[in-house]
Amino acid sequence: MLKISDLVKKFVGEKTASVAAVNGISFEVEEGRFFTLLGPSGCGKTTTLRCIAGLERHDEGTIFIGAQVVSSPRDRIFVAPHQRDIGMVFQSYAIWPHMTVFENVAFPLRVGKKHFDARQVKDKVMRALSVVQLDALADRPAPKLSGGQQQRLALARALVGEPKVLLLDEPLSNLDAKLREQMRVELRELQRQLGLTTIYVTHDQSEALAMSNVIAVMNDGKIMQMGHPRDIYLTPANQFVADFIGSTNFIHGTARAGAVETEHGVLQCTVPAGIRAGDAVLVSARPESIIVHLEKPANTQNLFEGQVQLAIFLGEMYDCQIQVGGQLMRARLNPAHRVRRGDNVFLQLPAEYITVLPANG
Ligand SMILES: Nc1ncnc2c1ncn2[C@@H]1O[C@H](COP(=O)(O)OP(=O)(O)O)[C@@H](O)[C@H]1O
Ligand SMILES: [Mg+2]
């Protein structure tokens, strides 16, 4: 439905040389799927979205919507934004304060390329409003809506033209935490019901994990890894992804056949193809995959001894910082146990839950 290939967008600085905000990214989104661009601030997410919308002219690459090429500088093709059949919601979703809810949603129909008579406008607007459950508030001045309602209004305005593709740029970031979690579910449900092909931009990893069919993790204008949320979380491809998504412990080591030698001892694990014995590696072990033993267990595979530095009781678990040699490791402990600062414990890192990554890669 949507295909981006080798997209490059440079901005020319006032004094500096031009910098590539987007530096050669490619991806494809199937019809009806929810695709997320996830990455830290400044990594090029908004620029990518604006290129797709036609609000920026990119320097290289091709953008397809359906079978149509909507921009390709090499072929001198550039379809204007309002002819691209997309709906967009920005971070600052800019509802028009001097208009009613109804007029806000009607606006794109009144200025769009197609002409609709009053009857058609009314039908379309009321349908879009009922989708986001604001139909009862159609005549209310837009500023008299709550934050969550304004967000839904922005969505209705993006949906009213029945776009092929919906582009959402951090649409929930202005909402408070509770509403954000609620809107996450509502928005996803709506997207599913309408079968809308959606590109969602966020810097919030839990939002991305919760909502997406596919996540592309971006850094510095490039895609670092692309995949299902589960795969991104469980098998990060590199240090950046392992670090950016969730929290993890990194342990330096040297690869051996089926193992990694570390300063704390040897870890039996799967060493991925491409890493050879003798290579410097980084082992990533997530806190929730580490087993904390209060007594030395019979099975001593991948077992490190350490000392509790901090154990914070969080109800569903203890969040522990454990000193292992020269390193503080984070792990979780079932709250049925009791631990105190200074206790000796044993950390076990099950081979199937640790990821071996190339060092500095
Ligand atoms: N209009 C612009 N002129 C110059 N530099 C820009 C412009 N827009 C974005 N940039 C730069 O491009 C990079 C990517 O920005 P952006 O796409 O907004 O990132 P994100 O949305 O991931 O936070 C940043 O370094 C930003 O400063
Ligand atoms: Mg942005």
Image (cartoon, rainbow, N blue to C red):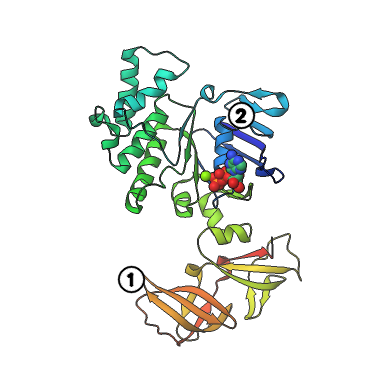
Q: Which mark is residue 64?
A: 2
Side of 184 relative to 209 (left or right): left
Task: Say if 147 sits above or below 308 in the image.
Answer: above
Between 41 and 136, the residue placed more toward the observer is 41
Pick the front one: 112 or 322: 112
Q: Pointer 2: residues within 10 angstroms few (<14), some, or many (20+)?
A: some
Name the quarter where the C terminus is drawn. bottom right
Q: Quadrant of ligand 1?
A: top right
Residue shown at the point (63%, 75%) measured from the top left: 267
Q: Give the residue drawn at x 31%, y 19%.
A: 123
Find numbered disc 2 in the image and state the secondary structure of the residue it sits on: strand
Q: Is residue 255 left or right of residue 175?
A: right
Q: Confirm or reject: label 2 Cβ below 8 Å from ligand 1.
A: no
The type of residue carrying mark 2 is: Phe
Count neighbours of disc 1 (C-alpha within 10 A) and say few if under 14, some if 14 to 19, many if 20 or more. few
The answer to whether residue 289 is above or below residue 163 is below
Quadrant occupied by the N terminus: top right
Q: Locate residue 22, reporting x and y percent.
A: 64, 43
Check whether the beta carbons of the residues at disc 2 and disc 1 lie within 8 A of each other.
no
Q: Earlier in the sequence, mark 2 or mark 1?
A: 2
Q: Is residue 252 visible?
A: yes
For mark 1, what is the residue?
315
Give coordinates of residue 357: x percent, y percent.
Answer: 66, 63
Please tell me which residue lies in front, 17 or 39.
17
* Image coords of residue 5 (percent x, y): 66, 36
Label 2 to label 1: alpha-carbon separation: 49 Å
